[in-house]
Image (cartoon, rainbow, N blue to C red):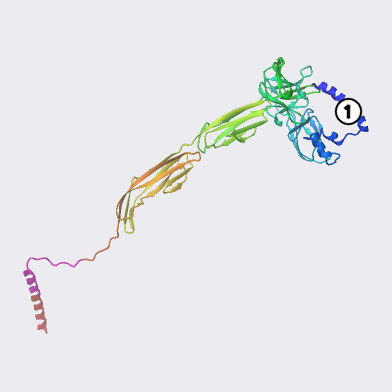
Amino acid sequence: MSIEIRRFLVITALLIACAGLALARQEPATPAEQTKDHVIGQTKGAVDKAQGAAGKTKAEVGKVRVNVSPQEAYIFVDGKPYRHRSTTLALSPGEHTVTVYNYGYEPMTMKVMVGASDNPEIEARLKPSGERVSGPWGRIQIEGAPGDAPVFLNGESQPFFVGHVDEMNNNFMLKQQLIVPPGTHQLTILHRKTGDTIFSGPVEVKENKRLIVYVKHGGKAKMVYKDWSHGAKITSLKRFEASTATATIAVAPVTGKFSADKEGIKCNEPAKLSWTSDGATITTVSANNEKLADSASGGLDVKPKQTTKYEFRAAGPGGVKTEETTINVDPTVKASLTPSAQELRFVKVGDQVQEQGSANLTWTASNADSVRIDPIGAVNGNSGSQEIKATPAQSNLGPLDETQTYKITAANVCGGSDTATASVHLTGSIEGAQVAEAEPTPALPATGSPLPLLALLGLISAVAGGVLHKYRGRR
């Protein structure tokens, strides 16, 4: 229905309303009739139950006046369509979210605490947003649906709202037109009062063609294509432009780029994701079904623990753009362990260690974040050197001949691990304590006959006798 015809019907309705007011003075309308068209989510049965059963004369509602600009802007209350143009909302007392949308403008969202009477007015003056739109493009014309029914492209939530049917349902003289990029789009039309779906389904828009969607009962529609050669002559359009009886909504295409600065990394190495988008109202970056970011453009540092595919999705009324990139993760760990000497000596006598050899044990562990050398324990870093000493397991007396073994185990959080061993040969001995012995009595010379001994004794006796004789003579 064209805006001119609608204006004619509105004037006619006003005349009828005036006549109705005269009759209303003689037979006042019931409170339920005054409020049932304005209370969100209430059916006639709900109103009757709320008023009739308790004997109330009027349902409790609060009135909120919302003035919008541009005048075709649509008002949503608590996520549901209410109506377009400036209007007075009738809401139940309490907090409500009021959002005003118009394609090509920045939306405005307000939290409103509604009382059970008149409330302060809301001024929703939207600011234009986005550059002019260039082709190629096609056109969608909707017939058979209520003029105030909100229309969505490529989504059913408020960010995908493009206008109402009466802005895109006429091709005769004063035109109302919805112009979109070529491609397949999901078209959704909702009933204003109930929020029920009038039609939802894919529509293929062809370049320089006018697609007429004839909405039928039961959620079905007939698609008819007409030439739209005028589209090829247009260089660019404002995203939204309307006058008293015309409207043009030019939906911008959705574009986007997504990349990673590295295709492959070692475990625990960082990589950076970068993306940009235009024309999208919802943008997400995700991996393994988990949302990582939702900004229209930006960057993100990541450290995947395994090979990971990252997905980028930019969606808006002008289409859906998806890209993906994969970062390959190498979890391989390589470990090495090398002693500076292959053989060490150890000598112990009693409780005293007289000799204990030592060596340096050098190790490396690439792509690892935890390293342990047994029997030493945990060590830090991906390389290093550790002093080792000959420490035999043997405790009994005797010579040493044994192997002293070390094992390195390196691992990372990505599931990679590696081991290596190194050995040194121990030689030497363990001896008991030494006790000092007494010196032996000198032995007499050995002879084969007693005569020499007797002669020696005789000589000694003679000498002793001579000494004794001299001593007596002096006396």
- Coordinates of residue 431 in the picture (x, y in percent): 29, 56
- Element class at badge 1: helix
Q: Residue at x 86, y 25 (%)?
A: 13
Please state, as top left, top right, bottom left or bottom right, where the C terminus lies in the image: bottom left
Name the residue rendered at 42%, 49% in the picture: 376
Q: Report the span colored magenta.
A: 440-460
Residue 184 x %, y %:
65, 22
- Looking at the image, residue 68 sits to the left or right of residue 371; the answer is right
Q: Quadrant of the N terminus?
A: top right
Q: Is residue 138 left or right of residue 114?
A: left
Residue carrying label 1: 17
The foreground one among 226 and 475 is 226
- Hey, which quadrant is residue 8 in on the image? top right
Residue situated in front as seen by the camera: 299 or 393 = 393
User: Mark 1, residues whose alpha carbon is within 10 Å: few (<14), some, or many (≥20)?
Assistant: few
The percent position of residue 383, horizontal first and vertical second, equals 44, 42
Of residue 347 and residue 101, the one placed in the foreground of this image is 101
Asked whether 446 falls inside the magenta stretch, the response is yes
Res. 230 in view: yes
- Residue drawn 88% across the image and 34% down it: 29
The image shows residue 241, relative to residue 43, as above or below, that is above
Residue extending farthest to the bottom is: 475
The residue lying furthest to the right in this view is 26
